[in-house]
DNA sequence: GAGTACATGTAATTAGTTACATGATTGA
DNA sequence: TCAATCATGTAACTAATTACATGTACTC
């Protein structure tokens, strides 16, 4: 599906960037929650985009002699990116999650072992939720302007908080069942 | 991380299965939400597990002459699987999601274009949420017994419903902003 | 002078998808 | 007899991770 291609094109479409800048963007607060790539994947992909004529670069010297490649998007790149962006696609049937896979097989653990895992996950997801919530409180007291990158940043951060909040609630539900549940109890409706 | 290896071992640990059965399990109601593999990945992996001595198989004839391989887990396989199952790991920093990537770049669309995408996603995630909810209502009126595979099935289905419910709420929040929001409005707290 | 951040690449391996390829069984 | 399902594989390609490899710039 060339998703990495469009993630990079989208970033370079915002402003000219080096490969290193792309990598930093993939590690940033908002984006790292739903997309990521290592530099070993980024540099070859940028060479490919160059060969396809979707980006071009200018060599910029930093300091005395450090050569850096500042990439910017071409007209062809912009068109390709815009076509991808507007593409209405089917939702993914699978969002892989290794901890849920372990939960699927919880029958092969005893209650204490599984509860240990649940509590560790709960601690980590709670921390992450609070951190993300803190980022929103810091940067987004007020709704950003439309057609700015701040709006995108806000919407995906909001989505990440919701996702973590729900993960925490699910873990608490699992813990509740393993601590207090009895077979045959009516299941608690989610809504 | 060999996650596919352990997904397969976990299934074969429940009961002897063919490669085809594994594929069906990966397509089933609960599991398909958080793990999946094509048969072209499954069969070579099962050969590998065989070579590693973690499974063994018996050839079973179906009908007149159709040979099928019924795999079962070995003692070594059971130990390897149990060690993996109890392993307390760090949560993943990235859960990739292409639609959120598009949202991150929404600045390059006009309101109508992005709203079209949002509404399509909303319809699909609402349908999926309702379908998953229906599965729970059908199969899990009462809490299953502990240490049965039904408990694992229930917990991950419950997690999938929560995930879809939250996705729907996030999409509604995005739609609300793009239909009624104005820059500078106070952001609605998530909780 | 040392440590961290900046900066760019390749190699080897593992993971996953799509296409190619074949054949038997079952039920309408 | 036709279609769907059962059943098993390989080939080619794309995607992603981990390790290898090198050198500059900035700040303390």
Image (cartoon, coloured by chain):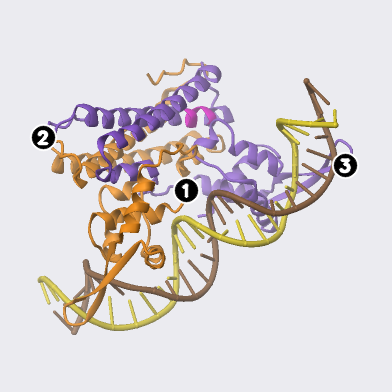
Chain colours: A orange, B purple, C brown, D yellow
Q: Check disc 2 and report its element: helix, strand or loop.
A: loop
Give the magenta part as a residue range: B153-157
Disc 2 with disc 1 on a shared chain: yes
Under tag 3, what secondary structure?
A: loop
Residue contact at pointers 2 and 1, CB within 8 angstroms: no
Q: Quick one: label 3 or label 1, which is nearer the N terminus?
A: 3
> Residue A21 occupies which quadrant of the picture?
bottom left
Q: Position of residue A20 (x, y in %)?
A: 28, 65
- Residue at 64 percent across and 41 percent down: it is B23
Write down the residue under mark 2. Answer: B184
Mark 3, residue position? B65
Q: Can you tell which of label 3 and label 1 is closer to the viewer?
A: 3
Residue at which label 1 appears: B87
Q: Does residue B176 appear left or right of residue B17 in this picture?
A: left
Q: Earlier in the sequence, mark 2 or mark 1?
A: 1
Question: Residue C5, position in %: x, y?
Answer: 21, 66
How far is mark 2 from mark 1, CA to CA? 47 Å
Residue B103 appears at what percent x and percent y? 31, 41
């Amino acid at each position: 599906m060339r998703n990495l291609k469009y993630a990079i094109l989208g970033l370079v479409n915002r402003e000219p960037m080096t490969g290193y800048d792309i990598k930093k963007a993939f590690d940033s607060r908002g984006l790292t929650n739903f997309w990521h790539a290592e530099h070993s994947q980024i540099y070859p992909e940028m060479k490919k985009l160059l060969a396809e004529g979707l980006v071009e670069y200018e060599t910029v010297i930093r300091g005395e002699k450090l050569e850096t490649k500042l990439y910017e998007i071409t007209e062809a790149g912009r068109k390709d990116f815009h076509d991808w962006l507007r593409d209405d696609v089917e939702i993914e049937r699978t969002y892989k999650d290794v901890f849920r896979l372990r939960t699927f097989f919880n029958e092969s653990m005893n209650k204490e072992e599984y509860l240990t895992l649940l509590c560790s996950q709960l601690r980590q997801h709670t921390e992450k939720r609070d951190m993300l919530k803190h980022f929103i409180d810091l940067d987004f007291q007020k709704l950003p302007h439309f057609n700015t990158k701040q709006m995108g940043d806000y919407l995906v951060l909001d989505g990440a908080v919701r996702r973590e909040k729900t993960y925490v609630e699910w873990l608490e539900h699992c813990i509740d069942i393993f601590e207090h549940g009895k077979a045959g109890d009516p299941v608690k409706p989610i809504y």
